[in-house]
Image: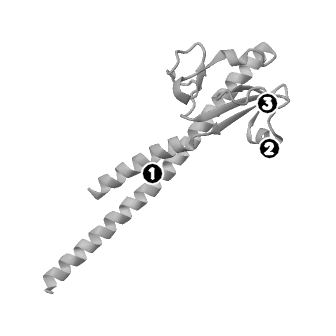
Amino acid sequence: MSIRNKILTAFIIVIAVAVLTMAFTSRYYIGSVFTRYTSGYRTVITEQWEAFFHAYYARQGSWEGVEQLLIPRSRGRGMVPANQPAGQVRSGTHGLLPGDGLLLADADGRVVLDSSDKMTGQTLSPSLLERGTPLLLNDQRIGTLIMEPQAVQAVQTLEEQFAHSLLRGVLW
């Protein structure tokens, strides 16, 4: 093998290693950024729901009728305020990521609102209530808000699709 072929082979190997390293590093980085983004988004949405329910309870003095304020959006895409057209999310409103669940329990831990409508009326376990956000009014617990990322697969699928596109782009 001539020196020219050895140098050419070495260049090809170096380029292949550099491209693969860049591709896998990019995939890891994008995955971590995407996870931080969805986590931050859920935190903001939880805060919006907390303010929404706190204002409702302060105005009404109870959770009675709270389920009528919200309507499910089509095909498991969360819930929106009832006065907003289904399927539309205004900026700053209380949208959920696809598949995410929302539970609102009263002070006794009984579910008064469930976005999937499977647990309404049931009493939640103390461990589940501890994972939620306590809703307080005048230093008294009026309820608990629990946001559940039930369909993490939906978010992972989006992340995987994006990562695969990025990997294909880098390889090309």
Q: In this view, does 86 lie above or below 6?
A: above
Checking the image for residue 127, the label placed there is: 2
Residues packed near mark 2 inside 10 Å, few (<14), some (14 to 19) or many (20 plus): few
Measure the C-alpha gap from mark 3 to mark 2: 15 Å
Classify residue 152 as left or right of residue 165. Answer: right
Residue 72 location in percent, x, y? 59, 22
Q: Which of marks 3 and 2 is nearer the N terminus?
A: 3
Kindly identify the amino acid type of the residue bearing the numbered disc 2: Ser
Image coordinates for residue 82, horizontal then vertical, percent = 60, 15
- Residue annotated with mark 1: 30
Residue under numbered circle 3: 122
- Structural crowding at the residue carrying mark 1, measured as other residues with C-alpha within 10 Å and reported as few (<14), some (14–19) or many (≥20): some
Label 3 with label 2: CB-CB less than 8 Å = no
Q: In which quarter of the image is residue 59?
A: top right
Q: What whole-number distance in Å separates the C-alpha atoms at marks 1 and 3? A: 40 Å
Q: Do the residues labelled 1 and 3 touch (CB within 8 Å)?
A: no
Give the SS element for disc 1: helix
At label 3, counting other C-alpha atoms closer than 10 Å, the crowd grade (few under 14, some 14-19, many 20 or more) is few
Tell me the residue at 74%/38% (across/down). Answer: 132
The amino acid marked with disc number 1 is Ile
